[in-house]
Protein backbone atom coordinates (compact mmCIF):
# COMPACT_ATOMS: atom_id res chain seq x y z
CA UNK A 1 0.00 0.00 0.00
CA UNK A 2 2.80 2.43 0.85
CA UNK A 3 4.41 1.71 -2.53
CA UNK A 4 1.42 3.31 -4.21
CA UNK A 5 1.87 6.47 -2.19
CA UNK A 6 5.54 6.93 -3.07
CA UNK A 7 6.34 9.78 -5.39
CA UNK A 8 7.59 8.81 -8.87
CA UNK A 9 11.34 8.59 -9.13
CA UNK A 10 13.15 11.54 -10.54
CA UNK A 11 15.23 11.15 -13.70
CA UNK A 12 18.86 12.22 -13.65
CA UNK A 13 21.29 12.65 -16.50
CA UNK A 14 24.91 11.63 -16.58
CA UNK A 15 27.58 11.02 -19.20
CA UNK A 16 29.27 7.68 -19.79
CA UNK A 17 32.16 7.52 -22.24
CA UNK A 18 30.96 10.82 -23.67
CA UNK A 19 27.40 9.59 -24.25
CA UNK A 20 24.53 11.20 -22.31
CA UNK A 21 22.15 8.84 -20.55
CA UNK A 22 19.05 9.39 -18.41
CA UNK A 23 18.36 6.99 -15.54
CA UNK A 24 16.11 6.88 -12.51
CA UNK A 25 17.55 8.38 -9.34
CA UNK A 26 19.04 5.58 -7.25
CA UNK A 27 20.10 3.48 -10.21
CA UNK A 28 23.71 2.30 -10.30
CA UNK A 29 26.38 3.23 -12.81
CA UNK A 30 26.24 -0.39 -13.99
CA UNK A 31 22.53 0.04 -14.77
CA UNK A 32 23.29 3.20 -16.71
CA UNK A 33 26.05 1.42 -18.64
CA UNK A 34 23.64 -1.36 -19.56
CA UNK A 35 21.09 1.17 -20.81
CA UNK A 36 23.74 2.39 -23.21
CA UNK A 37 24.79 -1.13 -24.16
CA UNK A 38 28.23 -0.67 -22.65
CA UNK A 39 29.54 -4.05 -21.58
CA UNK A 40 30.91 -3.77 -18.06
CA UNK A 41 32.41 -6.96 -16.59
CA UNK A 42 31.05 -8.26 -13.28
CA UNK A 43 31.88 -11.25 -11.10
CA UNK A 44 30.21 -10.83 -7.71
CA UNK A 45 27.17 -8.89 -8.91
CA UNK A 46 23.81 -10.50 -9.42
CA UNK A 47 20.46 -8.90 -10.23
CA UNK A 48 18.85 -10.59 -7.25
CA UNK A 49 21.72 -10.02 -4.81
CA UNK A 50 22.63 -7.08 -2.65
CA UNK A 51 25.81 -5.53 -4.05
CA UNK A 52 28.68 -7.51 -2.57
CA UNK A 53 31.17 -5.01 -3.88
CA UNK A 54 33.89 -7.60 -3.42
CA UNK A 55 35.59 -8.40 -6.73
CA UNK A 56 36.19 -4.85 -8.04
CA UNK A 57 36.27 -6.06 -11.63
CA UNK A 58 33.49 -3.62 -12.55
CA UNK A 59 35.41 -0.49 -11.59
CA UNK A 60 34.98 2.71 -13.59
CA UNK A 61 36.59 6.12 -13.44
CA UNK A 62 34.38 8.91 -12.14
CA UNK A 63 35.54 12.44 -12.94
CA UNK A 64 36.63 14.23 -9.77
CA UNK A 65 36.94 11.04 -7.76
CA UNK A 66 40.36 10.06 -6.41
CA UNK A 67 39.66 6.32 -6.51
CA UNK A 68 37.98 4.07 -9.04
CA UNK A 69 34.33 3.31 -8.26
CA UNK A 70 32.61 -0.09 -8.43
CA UNK A 71 29.91 0.37 -11.07
CA UNK A 72 27.70 -2.32 -9.54
CA UNK A 73 27.15 -0.48 -6.28
CA UNK A 74 27.94 3.20 -6.89
CA UNK A 75 24.78 5.19 -7.48
CA UNK A 76 24.61 7.33 -10.58
CA UNK A 77 24.49 11.06 -9.85
CA UNK A 78 23.17 13.94 -11.85
CA UNK A 79 25.93 15.49 -13.99
CA UNK A 80 28.36 12.65 -13.28
CA UNK A 81 31.00 11.92 -15.94
CA UNK A 82 32.15 8.30 -16.13
CA UNK A 83 34.88 6.58 -18.13
CA UNK A 84 34.53 2.80 -18.52
CA UNK A 85 37.43 2.11 -20.85
CA UNK A 86 40.33 4.33 -19.79
CA UNK A 87 43.90 3.07 -19.37
CA UNK A 88 43.50 3.26 -15.58
CA UNK A 89 40.29 1.19 -15.65
CA UNK A 90 41.76 -1.45 -17.96
CA UNK A 91 44.91 -1.68 -15.82
CA UNK A 92 42.89 -2.09 -12.62
CA UNK A 93 40.61 -4.77 -14.08
CA UNK A 94 43.64 -6.66 -15.38
CA UNK A 95 45.26 -6.57 -11.93
CA UNK A 96 42.07 -7.81 -10.27
CA UNK A 97 41.81 -10.73 -12.68
CA UNK A 98 45.49 -11.60 -12.24
CA UNK A 99 45.12 -11.60 -8.45
CA UNK A 100 42.01 -13.75 -8.62
CA UNK A 101 43.68 -16.19 -11.01
CA UNK A 102 46.76 -16.43 -8.79
CA UNK A 103 44.65 -17.58 -5.85
CA UNK A 104 42.92 -20.39 -7.73
CA UNK A 105 44.45 -23.79 -8.53
CA UNK A 106 43.70 -24.26 -12.21
CA UNK A 107 45.65 -27.51 -12.48
CA UNK A 108 42.51 -29.62 -12.17
CA UNK A 109 40.46 -27.64 -14.65
CA UNK A 110 39.28 -29.27 -17.83
CA UNK A 111 41.90 -29.16 -20.57
CA UNK A 112 44.74 -28.36 -18.20
CA UNK A 113 48.17 -29.53 -19.44
CA UNK A 114 49.13 -30.53 -15.88
CA UNK A 115 46.15 -32.86 -15.67
CA UNK A 116 47.05 -34.74 -18.83
CA UNK A 117 50.70 -35.29 -17.91
CA UNK A 118 51.75 -35.08 -14.25
CA UNK A 119 54.86 -33.04 -13.55
CA UNK A 120 57.75 -35.17 -12.23
CA UNK A 121 58.62 -34.35 -8.65
CA UNK A 122 62.34 -34.15 -7.90
CA UNK A 123 64.21 -33.31 -4.73
CA UNK A 124 67.91 -33.05 -3.97
CA UNK A 125 67.95 -36.55 -2.44
CA UNK A 126 65.57 -38.25 -4.87
CA UNK A 127 65.76 -37.96 -8.66
CA UNK A 128 62.67 -37.17 -10.66
CA UNK A 129 60.28 -40.04 -11.23
CA UNK A 130 59.40 -40.29 -14.87
CA UNK A 131 57.31 -42.65 -16.89
CA UNK A 132 60.10 -43.18 -19.42
CA UNK A 133 60.99 -46.93 -19.66
CA UNK A 134 64.68 -46.19 -20.29
CA UNK A 135 64.95 -44.08 -17.16
CA UNK A 136 63.65 -46.95 -15.06
CA UNK A 137 66.13 -49.47 -16.52
CA UNK A 138 69.19 -47.28 -15.97
CA UNK A 139 71.07 -47.99 -12.71
CA UNK A 140 70.70 -45.25 -10.05
CA UNK A 141 74.42 -44.37 -10.13
CA UNK A 142 74.20 -43.13 -13.75
CA UNK A 143 71.09 -40.96 -13.30
CA UNK A 144 71.49 -37.20 -13.33
S1 LIG B 1 30.84 -6.87 -9.77
FE1 LIG B 1 32.08 -7.30 -8.10
S2 LIG B 1 32.45 -5.35 -7.22
FE2 LIG B 1 31.16 -4.96 -8.88
Image (spheres, grey):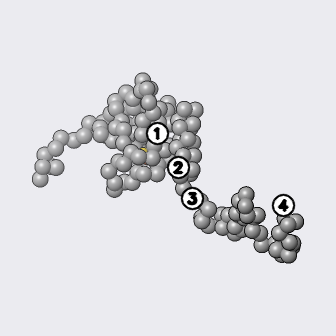
Image-based side of 15 in relation to 94, left or right = left
Q: Residues within 10 Å of mark 1 (few under 14, many from 20)?
A: many
- Estimate the spatial distance between the alpha carbons at disc 3 and disc 1, rounded to whole Å: 25 Å
- Estimate the spatial distance between the alpha carbons at disc 3 and disc 2, rounded to whole Å: 10 Å
Residue drawn at x 33%, y 41% as measured from the top left: 27
Residue hosting label 2: 100
Q: Secondary structure at mark 4?
A: loop
Q: Secondary structure at mark 3?
A: loop
Q: Position of residue 119 (x, y in %)?
A: 71, 64
- Estimate the spatial distance between the alpha carbons at disc 1 and disc 4, rounded to whole Å: 52 Å
Along the polypeptide, which appears first: circle 3 or circle 2?
2
Residue 109 visible in the current orientation = yes
**Whether the residue under disc 1 has CB within 8 Å of ligand 1:** yes
Q: Position of residue 10 (x, y in %)?
A: 26, 36
Q: Secondary structure at mark 2?
A: helix
| CB within 8 Å, label 1 to label 2 | no
Residue hosting label 3: 105
Along the polypeptide, which appears first: circle 2 or circle 4?
2
- Estimate the spatial distance between the alpha carbons at disc 4 and disc 3, rounded to whole Å: 31 Å
Disc marking residue 144: 4
Q: Nearer the viewer's eye, disc 1 or disc 2? A: 2
Q: Is residue 134 above or below residue 28?
A: below
Along the polypeptide, which appears first: circle 4 or circle 3?
3
Disc marking residue 59: 1
Image-based side of 60 in relation to 91, left or right = left
Amino acid sequence: MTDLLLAPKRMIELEIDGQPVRVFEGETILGACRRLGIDTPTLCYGDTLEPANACRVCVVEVEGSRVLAPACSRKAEDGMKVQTDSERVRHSRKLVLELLASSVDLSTTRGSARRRRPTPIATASAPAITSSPTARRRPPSTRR
